Amino acid sequence: MVVLNKIYTRTGDDGTTGLATGERVEKWSLRVESYGAVDETNSAIGVARLHTASDPDLSAALGRIQNDLFDLGADLATPEREKPLGWTPLRIVEAQVTRLETEIDAMNAAIPALTSFILPGGSAAAAYLHVARTISRRAERLVAQLAATPGEIVSGPALAYANRLSDFLFVAARRCNDNGASDVLWVPGANR
């Protein structure tokens, strides 16, 4: 259980922050940038959900994803180290990735195949989901960079979840555009 009875601690006034392991790192460290971008994605999804009330199934799926993103943030904030932690850290598991894939496939089954790239837009819900998608792509790039950094470990499921999330958000945006019927298509060279 998390208890936050004091919001400011002044411990970060020196430009560092504490990881879940208790170690202090710079606020601009790649690990902090990674889970910060995950948090940003979560906030963008929260804004998108304000526009999905007419689709309670999608809103519920987005709510589950928001909860998963806190799991992903906790996973990233708790680096694996040689010394045992003395407690079991929260980690993203393969079942969370599989659920995203299942939901992507179910949504995409009702949507015609793309014949062009699409421009972010259409309905408000779709536009906000595209914003969340682009933020999630940045988060994924940072998580992938962290995973490729010597001495840093990111689990396969955590990296896969970050990858799958932007796919989910893309398909969800198309769903919010009347299953693709209201997508705004890119016309290459249209304004030359």
Image (cartoon, rainbow, N blue to C red):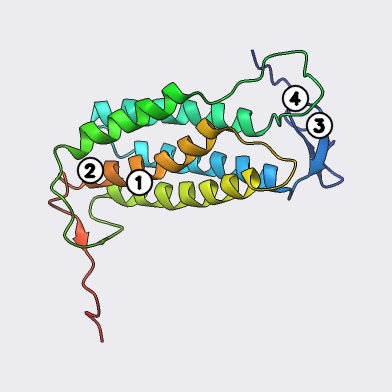
| 82 with respect to 172 (left or right) | right
Please name the amino acid that badge 1 sits on: Leu
Q: Nearer the viewer, mark 4 or mark 2?
A: 2
Q: Determine the residue positioned at 25% across, 62% down.
A: 117
Residue plotted at (75% across, 41% down): 151
Residue mark closest to the camera, 2 vs 3: 2
- Residue that label 4 marks: 6
Q: Answer yes or no: do the residues labelled 4 and 3 have beta carbons within 8 Å?
A: yes
Which element type, helix, strand or loop, lies under badge 3? loop
Residue beneath disc 1: 129
Q: Which mark is residue 9?
A: 3
Q: Label 4: how many residues lie within 10 Å, few (<14), some (14-19) or many (20+)? A: few
Decide if residue 4 is in sight here: yes
Residue for badge 2: 176
Disc 4 versus disc 1: nearer the observer: 1
Secondary element at tag 1: helix
Q: Position of residue 64 (x, y in %)?
A: 40, 25
- Closer to the N terminus: mark 2 or mark 3? 3
Residues at circles 4 and 2 in contact by the CB criterion of under 8 Å: no
Q: CA distance from mark 4 to mark 3?
A: 7 Å
Which amino acid, mark 2? Cys
